[in-house]
Amino acid sequence: MQIIIVISMVFSVLVAFFAVQNAGVVVVNLLWYKVTLSQAVIILCSALFGVLIMLPFDITRTIKYKLKLMELSGENKRLKEELKKFEVESDEAAQEKPLAVEEISSIDNQ
């Protein structure tokens, strides 16, 4: 996750540097309107709109991963409880084994 933040910051610096280098004034045609803006403003607004468009996808992905994490945590807890149950059964069987061997040997001796 930290690598994504670092890459995003580097990309932001590159976009800002590119915007400052292209600070000339241009005329933008928006349907019926003509607007005169700096290229830097257009570049920064485009980057901002890109982030805003991708934000819902990132939120969806994050929610999906958190739900999967909760599901796997529950399964992990259930499996740990099952493992403890089997360990107890194994210990009980190990304790009963010497008794069974003694009974068999006593039966054989008779």
Image (cartoon, helix red, strand yellow):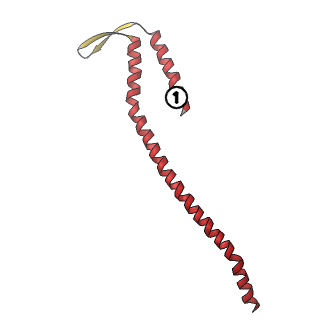
Q: Where is residue 78 shown, x and y percent of the image?
A: 52, 58
Q: In the rendered view, does 36 fall on the left or right side of 3?
A: left
Q: In the rendered view, does 1 fall on the left or right side of 93?
A: left
- In the rendered image, the quadrant that contains the C terminus is bottom right
Find the residue positioned furthest to the bottom.
110
Q: In the rendered view, does 86 fall on the left or right side of 65?
A: right
In depth, the one of 37 and 110 nearer the eye is 110
Tell me the amino acid under the disc marked 1.
Answer: Ile
Q: Residue at x 58, y 65 (%)?
A: 85
In the figure, residue 59 lies in which quadrant? top left
Examine the rendered structure and indicate whether residue 56 appears above or below residue 95: above
Q: Residue at x 47, y 49 (%)?
A: 70
Q: Residue at x 72, y 80 (%)?
A: 101
Mark 1 surroundings: few (<14), some (14-19) or many (≥20) residues within 10 A: few
Examine the rendered structure and indicate whether residue 7 appears above or below residue 33: below
Q: Where is residue 95 shown, x and y percent of the image?
A: 68, 73
Q: Which residue is mark 1?
A: 5
